[in-house]
Image (tube, rainbow, N blue to C red):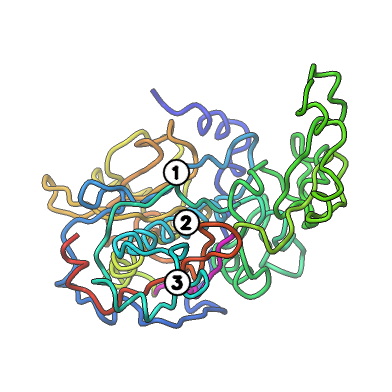
Amino acid sequence: MLPLLPLILASTVPLHLYAQDLAIPYPPPSSHIIHPLPHHYITEDELPQTFTWQNVNGNSYLTRMRNQHIPQYCGSCWAHAAMSSLADRIKINRSYINARKKSCHDDNNNNGQQHPDQAADELILGQLGPSPGPDIELSIQYILNCGVQPTSSSNRHLSCHGGSSLFAYEHIHSNLKFIPMETCLDYIACSSESQEGFCPHVRSLTTCEDWNVCRTCDGFTTPNDHGNNGAHSSLLRNGPSDEEQSTTTAKKDQYGCRAIPQGSIPNATILEYGSIEPNNIHAIKAELYARGPIKTSINAKYLLNYTGGILGSDDDPALNNATHNHGVSIVGWGYDESRERQHWIIRNSWGVYWGEMGFFRIELGRNLLGVEENFAWATPSTWMTFGDDCHDTYIDVSRDVLSMQLR
């Protein structure tokens, strides 16, 4: 059965489905690189014939699948690809930490912080343990709320009407300084300039005010109408006590919701970000293999009717159209024995009903749909794991190619 949403949208507003990713030419105007790039220390011969973060020794190191099209359409593929890739890299790096059997909330451990060099001495770096879970997921809505809105004089906007994953990483690293976790702010598929659907009616939820960074709502505005009683009813009617209010931001929005104090916001930060030289298969694979999924841009028009299989196996000339308009995340590569060719394994953001449970495959080395031209990656720096006084710290695995090869 063909996926319904892409077909419906393709017949009504086809451009809205995928024409939202802003491809940034290489070399990018901005990057921030600290650690050695993987293709400098991993040779082509050291890369396996197949590899995917979906299944490393029976473990998946990918965070959950997403759908940018609910609760309504929003052209945020760039944000979904960027945040999913970054969250995956946090999950991968947490698994190195888990393998060390030591985390930042252990006693006498540098006051809740880990020093990367100390951590490196205690572990065969590239060795992965089981994912410690639950997954850390990052708020896409925050990037829409606090991104740069579209103007006629700038192509750096970050909104429901398009954006760049690379600029999103730059914006988080240089300006916002952190990205809150998903339970701070759920995705509502609107940005401040959105006029579509219900967005004009929830305008106050799309600003970059404190309560739209990380929020909680204390109760119904008219609790008695909902049959509340007992202690919970009192809390809903009266809100937090004076003592509780003194530890929070007292100002509330029209829905009775308040901001979580900034020092208590569960968040992650970015250490470095950059791009990859177009059509450099060695560099693409090495980055993916060593550090985790990568955002890339493609021409998504061909994907509207995709239901499975390896794109490129029929040599359709339409696959040579490299016009970039959609952001996705490369999570690995496989090998097709029947054609003796490798292919990329890519995660989309159209939900698991689409494609191969939300994924698709496309032959690599031919730049089909422009898949090997435009990239963005970021490495996490810290992420909160056990309250506001505890962050785990990124481990660079560049010194341990041998353990990587044992995956």
Q: Which mark is residue 87?
A: 2
Which numbered disc flags the more N-terminal residue, 1 or 2?
A: 1
* Left or right, residue 344 beside residue 189: left
Which numbered disc flags the more N-terminal residue, 2 or 3?
A: 2
Q: Main secondary structure of the magenta part?
A: strand
Dot in front, 2 or 3:
3
| Magenta stretch, residue numbers | 267-276
Can you identify the residue that label 1 sits on? 64
The image quarter in which residue 39 lies: bottom left
At 37% from the left and 52% from the top, the residue drawn is 132
Can you identify the residue that label 3 sits on? 109
Q: Position of residue 60 (x, y in %)?
A: 31, 48
Inspect the magenta stretch and tell me whether residue 154 lies in it: no
* SS under mark 3: loop
**How many residues crowd around disc 3 within 10 Å: few (fewer than 14), some, or many (20 or more)?**
few
**How many residues crowd around disc 1 within 10 Å: few (fewer than 14), some, or many (20 or more)?**
few
Q: Name the amino acid type tagged 1.
A: Arg
Q: Position of residue 43 (x, y in %)?
A: 20, 77
The image quarter in which residue 2 lies: top left
* Left or right, residue 322 beside residue 403: right
**Label 2 to label 3: alpha-carbon separation:** 25 Å
At 26% from the left and 48% from the top, the residue drawn is 55
**Label 3 to label 1: alpha-carbon separation:** 31 Å
At 54% from the left and 67% from the top, the residue drawn is 166
**How many residues crowd around disc 2 within 10 Å: few (fewer than 14), some, or many (20 or more)?**
many
Q: Position of residue 268 (x, y in %)?
A: 55, 63
